[in-house]
Every structure is written in C-alpha cells, then in structure tokens.
Image (spheres, rainbow, N blue to C red):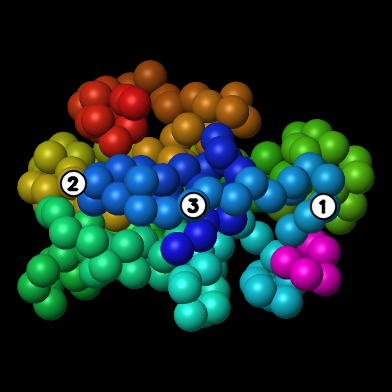
Amino acid sequence: MKIYDVEGFPNPARVRIALAEKGATDKVEFIPVDVLGGEHRSEAFRHKNPDTAVPMLELADGTCLSHCTAITEYIDAAFDGATLCGETAKDRAVIHMMNRRAEAGLLDAVGDYFHHATPGLGPDLETDQNADWGNRRKGTAVATMHYLDSVLSENDYLAGDRFSMADITAFAGLAFADFAKLDIPAELGNLRDWRDRVSSRPSIAA
C-alpha cells in the first residue's frame, strides 16, 4: 500500500491519524507529492487520481482510492483495532452523518476561506479566488464550531461515546482553522475541552 500525500496538510493528516489509530502506520509507504510545485495536477498524477488531490491510497493491485472518507473506510476494514467507522448499522450511519457535517461545515469551509479570502498557497496556485465566497464560508465554519460545541455538551465524542472518523475530521478542521488564523470562539468550552482530550491520543500526540 502506498499513500501519496503532503505531511502536515489537513486531509493527509486525517489518513495518518486513522492509520495510527489502527496501529498500521508501518504497513504503508508514504510518497510525498509536491503540491506547491503543482505535481498533483500533472498528467501522471491525474491518471491515478482525476480529483488531482491528496491524499491518495494506491493498493498492490493498482487500485487508487481518493477522498479521506473512502480511504479511512478501507483502512478501518483492512486492519485490526477499534473501529473508526462503526459496527452496527446505526453507529455507521451516525458516524458518517457527523463526519460529513464536520467535513463540509468545518474542514471544507475553512479550506474555502483559506483559498479564497486569504493569500492561500500563493498566486501561482490560487488562480481563481472569490473573496466574498471565502468570507461566507468563514461564517459557515464558525457556525459549525458552535454546532459541534452543542453536540459535545451531550456526548463525549462527535458521534457518541467512542472516538471515530468524525472526530478525526473535526480535529483536522480545527488544525486547518489554526493555520488560517480562524480561532475557536472563546465561549465554546465543550469544543475546546474535546480538542484537548483528543490531542492527547497517541495517534495525534506523536
């Protein structure tokens, strides 16, 4: 198995945390992709992943998987350890629902803000910016932080009483928000406490 990614980027971090949670980090080969140099848009990379994005998982038979949720689903099923995607039908549905809310409302919204309303990755890559859209998405990200805080007023984790893929996605979204200089509002104590607890997990603290 090969993981094509950029260490430290938010979405690659999601897959690396999932691998660490399953004790499988040493079971894959990490291949760095020069995103700042545009390698992800090259014909060779596009042939493997038409989404032109990282991370990407390449299996021994040549199958290439993109999108963090799909990759995490594969990792969760392929390796032993506590499930990240749920065991029962209800658990899986709730985890996927919360994962999507954290992804669309927080991580992706922060990404849109970063790429459209800030200098982002620089003029060579940020060639089609829309500052109004970026700032609207900033509002979405903050609203989602408030929503997640309300969920955490009743649950230890975003999808119930167990750490899951949804928590990984939200944690990566907040890390991206830090990078984009978008702070968690001071009054969101549940979200802040959750983040402190999650930060101490070996898969993240290491």
Vertical side of 163 occupied by 97: above or below? below
| Circle nearer the viewer, 1 or 3 | 3
At x 86% / y 55%, what residue is drawn? 128
Query: Which mark sits nearer the N-terminus, 1 or 3?
Result: 3
Three-letter code, disc 3: Glu
Quadrant showing the N terminus: bottom left
Q: Earlier in the sequence, mark 3 or mark 2?
A: 3
In this view, 109 is above or below 185: below
Which residue is drawn at the image coordinates 52% and 43% (left, top)?
10
Report which residue position mark 3 lands on.
29
Q: Residues within 10 Å of mark 1 (few under 14, many from 20)?
A: few
**Start-end of magenta stretch:** 41-45
Nearest to N terminus: mark 2 or mark 1: 1
44 part of magenta stretch: yes
Taken as a whole, is the magenta stretch helix, strand or loop? Answer: helix
Q: Disc 2 marks which residue? A: 163
**In the rendered image, which quarter is residue 197 located in?**
top left
Spot occupied by residue 150 in the image (x, y as percentages of width and height): 24, 42
Task: Give the residue number, with chain letter if any, for mark 1.
Answer: 38
Tag 1's secondary structure? loop
* Residue at (23, 50) in percent of width and height: 22
Q: Nearer the viewer, mark 2 or mark 1?
A: 1
